[in-house]
Amino acid sequence: MSSELELLKQRITELEAENVEIAELRKENTDLRNKLSVSDAEIAELKRSNNEFLRANREYNERRDAENAKLKARIEELESENIEVRDRLTKVEQKQSQNDITPNNNSSKFNSGAVHHEKPLEEKEMDSCLLEAHKKIVSEDIRRRNKEKKLQRESANQDVTFGNAYVSETVVVAPQLTSGNGIREIRIREIVYFRKMFSSKNWHSGYDLLRQGKRVAFVSTGAVMARALVEKASKLSKPDNLPVRAHTYYGDMDGKQRQKDFSDINVAWSELDCIAYTNTVEVRISFEVTGHFDIIIAITNIATPVH
C-alpha cells in the first residue's frame, strides 16, 4: 500500500513539472506569435515601399526618356538652323565686301546720268558695327549649343536634364501708336517680317525715322546688340540738328539707373528719342507706355513669324 502511495506521489511530482514546462512553452509560443505578427507587418510595409519606389522610378525613367528625345530633336533642329544662319551670314559678308569695293569701270555709267547707289560712309560704319554684334550673337549661339550637347551626353549617365534651348533670331518690325493728347486713330501700317537673318536695311529703317524726328524702340535678345544699336543711334541728329537721345536697358545694367528709370518709366522715356532693351527686362516694362514710340523694331527669340 505504501509503495503505491510513493508511486502516486512521484507521478504527481512529474506531472507538476510537466505542467510548469508546458506553461513556459505556451508563453514562448505567444511571444513567437507576437514577433511573427510584427514581422509580417514589417514585410508588408517593405513590400509597399518597394512597389512605390519601383513605380516612381519607372515614371522618372519614362519622363527622362521623353525629355531626352525632345532635347535630341531640338538639338538637331538647332543644328539645321545654324547651318542656315551660317550660309546667310556668308552671303551677307560677301555682299558687304562687294559694296565696299567700287569697280573702276563704273565711272562712265556715272557720267552718263546713272544713279549711284554706293552707301554713305556713316551707313557702312553702322553695317560693320551691327554685323560684328551679330557675329558675337552667332558665336554665343554655337558655344551654347555645344554646352547643351555636352550636358545631354552627361544626362544619359548621370540622369541630368536641361532646357531653355537657344533659338535663332527673327527680326520683326511692328507699328505702334503715336503719342499725343486725347484719343488718336489707330493707323495700321505695313508690318514687315525679316526671317532669321541680319540685314542692314532693318536697322537703317529705324535710323531713318530717327533722322526724321520720329521716336524708335529697339528690342534685342542680347545686350551686345542693344548697346551697338544705341551707340550708333546716339551719333545721329534730328531735323532740329540736336543729337538723338538714346539709352540701353538690359539684365545686368546698373542697379541705380534701373531703379531710377523704372520708378516712373513714363518720365524716363518721355525724355528719350530712342531706346534699346533686351527681353531680360521686357517683363518689367508696361506696354501701355509704348505710345511714346512711333515704331518698335524687335529682335526676338521666336522661331516663327509673329502675327
Image (cartoon, helix red, strand yellow):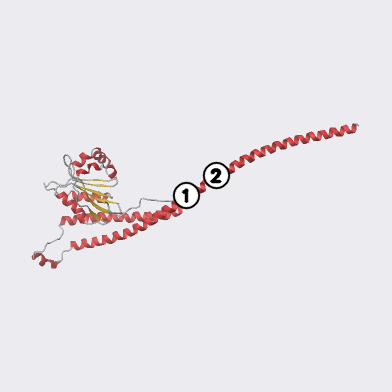
Distance from the alpha carbon under mark 2 to that under mark 1: 17 Å
Characterize the local packing of mark 1: few (<14), some (14-19) or many (20 or more) Cα atoms within 10 angstroms. few
The type of residue carrying mark 2 is Arg
Residue occupied by mark 1: 59
Q: Is residue 46 above or below residue 16?
A: below
Residue 188: image location, x then y, percent:
20, 49
Characterize the local packing of mark 2: few (<14), some (14-19) or many (20 or more) Cα atoms within 10 angstroms. few
Quadrant position of residue 31: top right
> Farthest right residue?
1
Tell me which residue sits at (31%, 58%) in the image.
Answer: 82
Q: Give the quadrant of the N terminus.
A: top right
- Element type at marker 2? helix
Q: Could you tell which of marks 2 and 1 lies nearer the N-terminus?
A: 2
- Element type at marker 1? helix
Residue occupied by mark 2: 48
Residue 83: image location, x then y, percent:
31, 60
Res. 159 visible in picture: no
Numbered label attached to residue 110: none
Residue 274: image location, x then y, percent:
19, 46
Residue 194: image location, x then y, percent:
24, 55
The type of residue carrying mark 1 is Glu
Tell me which residue sits at (22%, 57%) in the image.
Answer: 199
Front in this rendered view, residue 147 or 71: 71
Front in this rendered view, residue 144 or 113: 113
Quadrant position of residue 43: top right
Quadrant position of residue 45: top right
Q: Is residue 287 above or below residue 159?
A: above
Task: Say whether residue 164 is left or right of residue 58.
Answer: left
